[in-house]
Image (cartoon, rainbow, N blue to C red):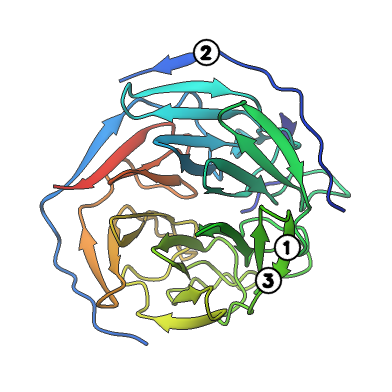
Amino acid sequence: MKKLMFLSLASIFLLHSCKESDQTYLDLQNTQSSTTLTINDSWIRKADFRFSRSYSVGFSINGKGYIGTGASDGEALNDFWEYDPISDSWTQKADFAGIARTGAVGFSISNKGYIGTGYNGYSPDEYLKDFWEYSPVTNCWTKKANFKGNGRISAVGLSIGDKGYIGTGRNSTSVNTDFWEYNPKTNSWLQKAEFPGRARSEATAFTISDKGYVGTGYTGSNYEDLTDFWEYNPATDSWTRKADFAGGERSTATSFSVDGFGYIGTGLNHSGKFFKDFWAYNPLTNTWVQKADFAGEVRTAATGFSIGNKGYVGLGDDNNKDLWQFSED
Protein backbone atom coordinates (compact mmCIF):
# COMPACT_ATOMS: atom_id res chain seq x y z
CA MET A 1 0.00 0.00 0.00
CA LYS A 2 1.13 3.56 -0.67
CA LYS A 3 0.41 6.54 1.49
CA LEU A 4 -1.41 9.17 -0.54
CA MET A 5 0.09 12.62 -0.60
CA PHE A 6 -3.45 13.87 -1.18
CA LEU A 7 -6.74 12.35 -2.25
CA SER A 8 -9.20 13.75 -4.74
CA LEU A 9 -11.44 12.37 -6.21
CA ALA A 10 4.57 -0.03 -25.91
CA SER A 11 2.72 -3.20 -25.43
CA ILE A 12 4.34 -5.10 -22.61
CA PHE A 13 3.50 -8.65 -21.72
CA LEU A 14 4.75 -9.49 -18.26
CA LEU A 15 3.33 -12.38 -16.30
CA HIS A 16 3.16 -11.25 -12.71
CA SER A 17 4.09 -13.79 -10.10
CA CYS A 18 0.79 -15.19 -8.89
CA LYS A 19 -0.07 -15.92 -5.33
CA GLU A 20 -2.99 -18.07 -4.42
CA SER A 21 -4.83 -17.25 -1.22
CA ASP A 22 -7.23 -19.38 0.76
CA GLN A 23 -8.36 -16.50 2.97
CA THR A 24 -12.13 -16.52 2.91
CA TYR A 25 -14.12 -13.92 4.81
CA LEU A 26 -17.72 -14.89 5.53
CA ASP A 27 -20.13 -12.56 7.29
CA LEU A 28 -23.32 -12.00 7.64
CA GLN A 29 -33.30 14.87 -25.31
CA ASN A 30 -35.17 14.93 -22.40
CA THR A 31 -38.40 13.23 -21.66
CA GLN A 32 -40.37 13.53 -18.49
CA SER A 33 -39.39 10.94 -15.90
CA SER A 34 -41.64 9.29 -13.36
CA THR A 35 -40.85 10.12 -9.74
CA THR A 36 -43.17 7.51 -8.25
CA LEU A 37 -41.35 5.36 -5.72
CA THR A 38 -41.47 1.70 -6.62
CA ILE A 39 -42.31 -0.19 -3.44
CA ASN A 40 -41.58 -3.75 -4.53
CA ASP A 41 -37.81 -3.32 -4.70
CA SER A 42 -35.64 -4.92 -2.07
CA TRP A 43 -32.19 -4.30 -0.63
CA ILE A 44 -30.67 -7.17 1.36
CA ARG A 45 -27.50 -6.80 3.37
CA LYS A 46 -24.85 -9.34 2.43
CA ALA A 47 -21.47 -10.29 3.90
CA ASP A 48 -19.40 -7.22 4.73
CA PHE A 49 -16.24 -6.64 2.76
CA ARG A 50 -13.08 -7.24 4.77
CA PHE A 51 -11.91 -3.60 4.90
CA SER A 52 -13.54 -0.21 4.43
CA ARG A 53 -12.51 1.75 1.33
CA SER A 54 -13.68 4.13 -1.37
CA TYR A 55 -12.95 4.73 -5.06
CA SER A 56 -12.38 1.01 -5.66
CA VAL A 57 -12.98 -0.94 -8.87
CA GLY A 58 -15.78 -3.49 -9.21
CA PHE A 59 -16.84 -5.90 -11.96
CA SER A 60 -18.19 -9.43 -12.35
CA ILE A 61 -16.98 -12.54 -14.18
CA ASN A 62 -18.84 -15.85 -14.52
CA GLY A 63 -21.17 -15.41 -11.58
CA LYS A 64 -18.62 -13.89 -9.18
CA GLY A 65 -18.02 -10.28 -8.19
CA TYR A 66 -14.59 -8.69 -7.88
CA ILE A 67 -13.44 -5.61 -5.96
CA GLY A 68 -9.95 -4.16 -5.69
CA THR A 69 -7.72 -1.09 -5.41
CA GLY A 70 -9.15 2.13 -3.92
CA ALA A 71 -8.16 4.02 -0.78
CA SER A 72 -8.66 3.71 2.97
CA ASP A 73 -7.46 6.15 5.65
CA GLY A 74 -5.14 7.91 3.22
CA GLU A 75 -3.62 4.69 1.87
CA ALA A 76 -3.78 3.63 -1.76
CA LEU A 77 -4.52 -0.09 -2.06
CA ASN A 78 -3.74 -2.96 -4.42
CA ASP A 79 -5.50 -5.92 -2.79
CA PHE A 80 -8.12 -7.79 -4.82
CA TRP A 81 -11.10 -9.88 -3.68
CA GLU A 82 -13.73 -12.23 -5.10
CA TYR A 83 -17.34 -12.32 -3.92
CA ASP A 84 -19.36 -15.53 -4.24
CA PRO A 85 -23.10 -14.78 -4.04
CA ILE A 86 -23.99 -18.43 -3.45
CA SER A 87 -21.94 -18.77 -0.27
CA ASP A 88 -22.16 -15.01 0.48
CA SER A 89 -18.42 -14.96 1.14
CA TRP A 90 -15.26 -13.07 0.16
CA THR A 91 -11.99 -14.73 -0.88
CA GLN A 92 -8.75 -12.81 -1.26
CA LYS A 93 -7.12 -13.28 -4.66
CA ALA A 94 -3.74 -12.31 -6.11
CA ASP A 95 -3.00 -8.65 -5.42
CA PHE A 96 -3.47 -6.30 -8.34
CA ALA A 97 -0.07 -6.35 -10.03
CA GLY A 98 0.23 -2.64 -10.77
CA ILE A 99 1.19 -0.13 -8.11
CA ALA A 100 -1.40 0.69 -5.46
CA ARG A 101 -3.95 3.25 -6.64
CA THR A 102 -7.32 4.89 -6.17
CA GLY A 103 -9.85 6.18 -8.71
CA ALA A 104 -8.96 3.54 -11.31
CA VAL A 105 -11.41 2.05 -13.81
CA GLY A 106 -12.32 -1.58 -14.32
CA PHE A 107 -14.53 -3.75 -16.49
CA SER A 108 -14.77 -7.34 -17.64
CA ILE A 109 -14.71 -8.81 -21.15
CA SER A 110 -15.69 -12.44 -21.59
CA ASN A 111 -13.92 -14.32 -18.77
CA LYS A 112 -11.22 -11.72 -17.98
CA GLY A 113 -11.14 -8.59 -15.85
CA TYR A 114 -9.28 -5.36 -16.59
CA ILE A 115 -8.02 -2.51 -14.38
CA GLY A 116 -6.14 0.63 -15.39
CA THR A 117 -5.54 4.36 -14.90
CA GLY A 118 -6.00 5.94 -11.45
CA TYR A 119 -3.88 7.91 -9.00
CA ASN A 120 -1.08 6.79 -6.72
CA GLY A 121 -0.09 9.99 -4.93
CA TYR A 122 3.58 10.10 -5.88
CA SER A 123 5.34 12.18 -8.54
CA PRO A 124 6.12 11.90 -11.37
CA ASP A 125 3.65 9.11 -12.14
CA GLU A 126 0.81 10.00 -9.82
CA TYR A 127 -1.75 9.95 -12.65
CA LEU A 128 -1.49 6.51 -14.19
CA LYS A 129 -2.13 4.96 -17.60
CA ASP A 130 -0.98 1.36 -17.18
CA PHE A 131 -3.50 -1.38 -17.90
CA TRP A 132 -3.74 -4.95 -16.60
CA GLU A 133 -5.70 -8.12 -17.31
CA TYR A 134 -6.85 -10.58 -14.62
CA SER A 135 -7.64 -14.25 -15.22
CA PRO A 136 -9.79 -15.87 -12.51
CA VAL A 137 -8.81 -19.29 -13.86
CA THR A 138 -5.10 -18.82 -13.15
CA ASN A 139 -5.49 -16.07 -10.52
CA CYS A 140 -2.81 -14.12 -12.42
CA TRP A 141 -2.36 -10.56 -13.67
CA THR A 142 -0.82 -9.78 -17.07
CA LYS A 143 0.36 -6.32 -18.12
CA LYS A 144 -1.25 -5.11 -21.32
CA ALA A 145 -0.76 -2.14 -23.63
CA ASN A 146 -0.85 1.15 -21.74
CA PHE A 147 -3.99 3.24 -22.08
CA LYS A 148 -3.35 5.67 -24.94
CA GLY A 149 -4.93 8.75 -23.40
CA ASN A 150 -3.20 10.80 -20.73
CA GLY A 151 -2.90 9.46 -17.19
CA ARG A 152 -6.02 10.24 -15.16
CA ILE A 153 -8.19 9.63 -12.12
CA SER A 154 -11.96 9.14 -11.87
CA ALA A 155 -12.56 8.23 -15.51
CA VAL A 156 -15.37 5.92 -16.62
CA GLY A 157 -14.78 2.38 -17.80
CA LEU A 158 -17.22 -0.07 -19.37
CA SER A 159 -17.34 -2.97 -21.80
CA ILE A 160 -19.64 -3.44 -24.76
CA GLY A 161 -19.52 -6.84 -26.41
CA ASP A 162 -15.90 -7.89 -26.84
CA LYS A 163 -14.38 -4.40 -26.43
CA GLY A 164 -13.59 -2.18 -23.47
CA TYR A 165 -13.88 1.61 -23.23
CA ILE A 166 -12.28 4.32 -21.07
CA GLY A 167 -13.03 8.04 -21.19
CA THR A 168 -13.52 11.31 -19.29
CA GLY A 169 -11.62 11.75 -15.99
CA ARG A 170 -8.99 14.30 -15.00
CA ASN A 171 -5.41 14.90 -13.97
CA SER A 172 -3.56 17.92 -12.60
CA THR A 173 -3.69 19.81 -15.92
CA SER A 174 -6.84 18.73 -17.75
CA VAL A 175 -10.39 17.43 -17.51
CA ASN A 176 -11.07 15.08 -20.39
CA THR A 177 -13.69 14.24 -23.00
CA ASP A 178 -11.68 11.73 -25.02
CA PHE A 179 -12.99 8.18 -25.38
CA TRP A 180 -10.92 5.10 -26.22
CA GLU A 181 -11.68 1.52 -27.24
CA TYR A 182 -9.58 -1.44 -26.10
CA ASN A 183 -9.45 -4.61 -28.21
CA PRO A 184 -8.20 -7.56 -26.12
CA LYS A 185 -7.65 -9.70 -29.21
CA THR A 186 -5.05 -7.30 -30.60
CA ASN A 187 -4.08 -5.71 -27.28
CA SER A 188 -4.52 -2.28 -28.84
CA TRP A 189 -6.27 1.04 -28.22
CA LEU A 190 -8.23 3.07 -30.77
CA GLN A 191 -9.53 6.58 -30.17
CA LYS A 192 -13.27 6.87 -30.77
CA ALA A 193 -15.75 9.74 -31.08
CA GLU A 194 -15.20 12.34 -28.37
CA PHE A 195 -17.67 12.33 -25.49
CA PRO A 196 -19.94 15.27 -26.49
CA GLY A 197 -20.92 16.44 -23.03
CA ARG A 198 -18.87 18.82 -20.94
CA ALA A 199 -15.48 17.61 -19.76
CA ARG A 200 -15.89 15.89 -16.39
CA SER A 201 -14.61 13.45 -13.82
CA GLU A 202 -16.37 11.23 -11.29
CA ALA A 203 -19.12 10.40 -13.77
CA THR A 204 -20.69 6.95 -13.83
CA ALA A 205 -21.34 4.46 -16.63
CA PHE A 206 -23.00 1.15 -17.45
CA THR A 207 -23.86 -1.03 -20.44
CA ILE A 208 -27.27 -2.19 -21.63
CA SER A 209 -27.28 -4.68 -24.48
CA ASP A 210 -25.02 -3.27 -27.21
CA LYS A 211 -24.94 0.36 -26.00
CA GLY A 212 -22.93 2.21 -23.40
CA TYR A 213 -24.26 4.99 -21.13
CA VAL A 214 -22.34 7.78 -19.40
CA GLY A 215 -23.69 10.55 -17.18
CA THR A 216 -23.50 12.74 -14.08
CA GLY A 217 -20.09 13.81 -12.72
CA TYR A 218 -18.60 17.24 -12.15
CA THR A 219 -16.70 19.68 -14.30
CA GLY A 220 -13.55 20.06 -12.24
CA SER A 221 -12.21 23.46 -11.30
CA ASN A 222 -15.55 25.16 -10.62
CA TYR A 223 -17.13 22.06 -9.02
CA GLU A 224 -20.29 22.17 -11.11
CA ASP A 225 -22.22 18.92 -10.79
CA LEU A 226 -24.02 17.53 -13.81
CA THR A 227 -27.17 15.59 -14.72
CA ASP A 228 -26.77 15.04 -18.46
CA PHE A 229 -26.84 11.47 -19.71
CA TRP A 230 -25.53 10.06 -22.99
CA GLU A 231 -25.77 6.85 -25.03
CA TYR A 232 -22.80 5.53 -27.01
CA ASN A 233 -23.37 3.28 -30.03
CA PRO A 234 -20.16 1.44 -30.98
CA ALA A 235 -21.65 0.27 -34.29
CA THR A 236 -21.84 3.88 -35.55
CA ASP A 237 -19.24 5.37 -33.17
CA SER A 238 -21.76 8.02 -32.19
CA TRP A 239 -23.26 9.62 -29.09
CA THR A 240 -26.91 10.54 -28.49
CA ARG A 241 -28.12 12.66 -25.60
CA LYS A 242 -30.82 10.97 -23.54
CA ALA A 243 -33.14 12.10 -20.75
CA ASP A 244 -31.16 13.80 -18.00
CA PHE A 245 -30.61 11.77 -14.86
CA ALA A 246 -33.74 12.44 -12.81
CA GLY A 247 -32.12 12.33 -9.38
CA GLY A 248 -30.49 15.73 -9.71
CA GLU A 249 -26.94 17.01 -10.05
CA ARG A 250 -24.28 14.79 -8.49
CA SER A 251 -20.91 13.15 -8.80
CA THR A 252 -19.25 10.03 -7.32
CA ALA A 253 -22.49 8.08 -7.84
CA THR A 254 -22.44 4.33 -8.37
CA SER A 255 -24.20 2.28 -11.02
CA PHE A 256 -24.89 -1.14 -12.50
CA SER A 257 -27.21 -2.67 -15.11
CA VAL A 258 -29.61 -5.60 -14.73
CA ASP A 259 -32.15 -7.15 -17.11
CA GLY A 260 -32.12 -4.33 -19.64
CA PHE A 261 -32.26 -1.47 -17.13
CA GLY A 262 -29.52 0.78 -15.81
CA TYR A 263 -29.37 1.97 -12.20
CA ILE A 264 -27.70 5.03 -10.65
CA GLY A 265 -27.68 6.16 -7.03
CA THR A 266 -25.76 7.47 -4.01
CA GLY A 267 -23.07 10.15 -4.46
CA LEU A 268 -22.94 13.84 -3.58
CA ASN A 269 -23.12 17.32 -4.98
CA HIS A 270 -20.68 20.06 -4.16
CA SER A 271 -23.26 22.14 -2.32
CA GLY A 272 -22.78 19.57 0.46
CA LYS A 273 -25.70 17.20 -0.12
CA PHE A 274 -25.15 13.44 0.12
CA PHE A 275 -27.53 10.94 -1.49
CA LYS A 276 -28.95 7.46 -1.00
CA ASP A 277 -31.71 7.57 -3.60
CA PHE A 278 -31.68 5.08 -6.47
CA TRP A 279 -33.07 5.41 -9.99
CA ALA A 280 -33.70 3.03 -12.90
CA TYR A 281 -33.25 4.00 -16.54
CA ASN A 282 -35.36 2.34 -19.25
CA PRO A 283 -33.65 2.71 -22.65
CA LEU A 284 -36.83 1.69 -24.52
CA THR A 285 -38.85 4.62 -23.14
CA ASN A 286 -35.91 6.92 -22.32
CA THR A 287 -37.30 7.49 -18.83
CA TRP A 288 -36.11 7.34 -15.23
CA VAL A 289 -38.13 5.82 -12.39
CA GLN A 290 -37.22 6.24 -8.74
CA LYS A 291 -36.63 2.98 -6.88
CA ALA A 292 -36.31 2.12 -3.21
CA ASP A 293 -33.57 4.14 -1.54
CA PHE A 294 -30.24 2.44 -1.02
CA ALA A 295 -30.57 0.70 2.35
CA GLY A 296 -27.13 1.59 3.70
CA GLU A 297 -25.97 4.99 4.89
CA VAL A 298 -25.51 7.88 2.50
CA ARG A 299 -22.11 7.71 0.83
CA THR A 300 -19.85 8.73 -2.02
CA ALA A 301 -17.47 6.76 -4.23
CA ALA A 302 -19.15 3.41 -3.56
CA THR A 303 -18.60 0.36 -5.77
CA GLY A 304 -21.28 -1.31 -7.88
CA PHE A 305 -21.51 -4.43 -10.02
CA SER A 306 -24.16 -6.94 -11.10
CA ILE A 307 -24.33 -10.73 -11.01
CA GLY A 308 -27.18 -12.36 -12.91
CA ASN A 309 -30.39 -10.47 -12.15
CA LYS A 310 -29.08 -8.83 -8.98
CA GLY A 311 -27.20 -5.60 -8.43
CA TYR A 312 -24.66 -5.02 -5.67
CA VAL A 313 -23.56 -1.76 -4.04
CA GLY A 314 -21.18 -1.27 -1.15
CA LEU A 315 -18.08 0.29 0.40
CA GLY A 316 -17.44 4.01 -0.21
CA ASP A 317 -16.83 7.02 2.04
CA ASP A 318 -16.93 7.33 4.96
CA ASN A 319 -15.24 4.16 6.15
CA ASN A 320 -17.94 1.84 4.81
CA LYS A 321 -17.42 -1.88 4.20
CA ASP A 322 -21.03 -3.07 3.93
CA LEU A 323 -22.39 -4.76 0.80
CA TRP A 324 -26.04 -4.70 -0.30
CA GLN A 325 -27.91 -6.70 -2.92
CA PHE A 326 -30.66 -5.08 -4.98
CA SER A 327 -33.46 -6.84 -6.82
CA GLU A 328 -36.88 -6.01 -8.22
CA ASP A 329 -39.28 -8.60 -6.83
Disc number lying in front (1 or 3): 1
- The residue shown at (62%, 45%) is 114
Dot 2: few (<14), some (14–19), or many (≥20) neighbours within 10 Å?
few
Q: Nearer the viewer, residue 192 or 293?
A: 192
At a point 78% along the width and 53% down the height, the residue shown is 146
Q: Is residue 175 left or right of residue 290?
A: right
Q: In the figure, is residue 3 to the left or right of 138?
A: right
As drawn, the label of residue 319 is none
Give me the disc on residue 189.
1
Mark 2, mark 1: which one is toward the viewer?
1
Q: Earlier in the sequence, mark 2 or mark 1?
A: 2
- Check the picture and name the quadrant holding the N terminus: top right
Q: Is residue 68 visible?
A: yes
Q: Which residue sits at x=11%, y=51%?
A: 40
Residue tagged 2: 23
| Cα–Cα gap, marks 2 and 1 | 36 Å
- Can residue 5 be seen from the camera position used here? no
- Amino acid type, mark 3: Asn
Residue 201 lies, in percent from the top left, at 60, 64
Residue hosting label 3: 176
Q: Measured from the top left, where is residue 213 in percent x and y?
A: 45, 68
Nearer to us in this view, 16 or 174: 16
In the image, which is nearer the foreground, mark 3 or mark 2?
Answer: 2
Instruction: Specify which label sits upstream in the sequence, 3 or 2.
Output: 2
* Neighbour tally class for label 3: few under 14, some 14-19, many 20 plus, Cα within 10 Å: many
Identified by mark 1, the residue type is Trp
Q: Amino acid at mark 2?
A: Gln
Distance Cα–Cα, label 3 vs label 2 = 39 Å
Question: For this rendering, which residue is in front, 230 or 201?
Answer: 230
